[in-house]
Image: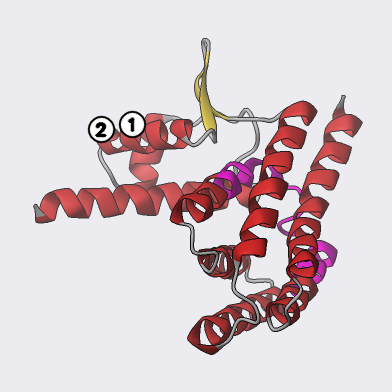
Amino acid sequence: MGAIATSGDRIQEVIRLLEEDIVLGRLYPRERLVEDQLSQRFEISRHLVRQVLAELEQAGLVLRASGRGVVVAEYSIDEVNELYQMRDLLEGQAARLIPLPLTGAALAEIEALAQTYADAVDRMDMQGVIRANKAFHEKIFAQCGNRFLSGSIDQMAQRANLVRFSTSTNPTFLARSRDEHFQIIEALKQTDHEVLAALCVQHLQPSREYYIEMHRRRA
């Protein structure tokens, strides 16, 4: 049982690291993922590499291209707009379900995560930025009280990793994201769900807009 758990943990760790590579632009859209190279890099068997790639494929982050094997996926403009329409709906609704004003341990943890993110932005610690950002949003939407809704938000956020690379290392966008986190916290302390929902949806837009702009430039 321990060996199975250890293998499962290692698979999730490698998935997380590859997702971070995608967000940070270390892996580009349509770039090949070669089993032997991944096996050597992460010091895992090819069997585990195939499991990692299968989970990434299920999440929509990689695909199997004819004659090329597994490659990092790339979204069309229509796909990005559809993905972000779904994210707008899910996150807006979750925000409306959070009991306001939020207080206690949950609020304190969210505030601490926002500060951790801000500190990582100041240091330009990209790995720290990604991890604090993920934890911050997961903690907020966990407060909606609907596990299926918060789980769906997490799944859509994972798919958006293919979009977020366009802004993930840009200091201007990072500073804006940091400031918006604190605005969301202030809304959590108030009682207006529509203000909170609007801030959450607004927070999603820069990466979508910049990705579409980049895509059109390349066309």
Front one among 102 and 84: 102
SS of the residue at dot 2? helix
* Residue 26 seen in this snapshot: no
Name which residue lies at 83% across and 33% down: 215
Q: Of the numbered discs in the image, which one, if any, rests on residue 50?
A: 1
Residue sitting farthest toward the left: 1
Task: Point out which mark residue 8 bears.
Answer: none
Pinpoint residue 186: horizontal percent, then vertical percent: 74, 82
Visual colour scheme: secondary structure
112 relative to 84, above or below? below
Indicate yes or no whether the magenta region holds residue 171. Answer: yes
As measured in the structure, the alpha-carbon distance from the residue carrying label 1 to the one carrying label 2 is 5 Å
Q: Say which quarter of the image contains residue 137.
A: bottom right
Task: Examine the structure image and report whether residue 70 is included in the region drawn in magenta.
Answer: no
- The residue carrying pointer 1 sits among few (fewer than 14), some (14 to 19) or many (20 or more) residues within 10 Å by Cα, namely some
Mark 2: few/some/many CA within 10 Å (<14, 14-19, 20+): few
The residue under label 2 is which amino acid type? His
User: Residue beneath label 2, please?
Assistant: 47
| Left or right side of 7 for 76 | right
The percent position of residue 123, horizontal first and vertical second, equals: 68, 78
Query: How many numbered badges does the structure rendering display?
Result: 2
Q: Is residue 62 visible?
A: yes
> Tag 1: residue type?
Arg
Q: In this picture, which residue range is highlighted in magenta?
A: 156-178
Quarter of the rendering occupied by the C terminus:
top right
Residue 69: x percent and y percent? 47, 19
Please give the name of the residue rendered at 48% of the width and 51% of the height, measured from the top-left corner.
Answer: 151
- Left/right placement of residue 50 relative to residue 112 reads left
**Which secondary structure class fits the magenta region best?**
helix
- Position in image of residue 204 (x %, y %): 75, 54
Contact between marks 1 and 2 (CB within 8 A): the answer is yes
Which element is circle 1 on?
helix
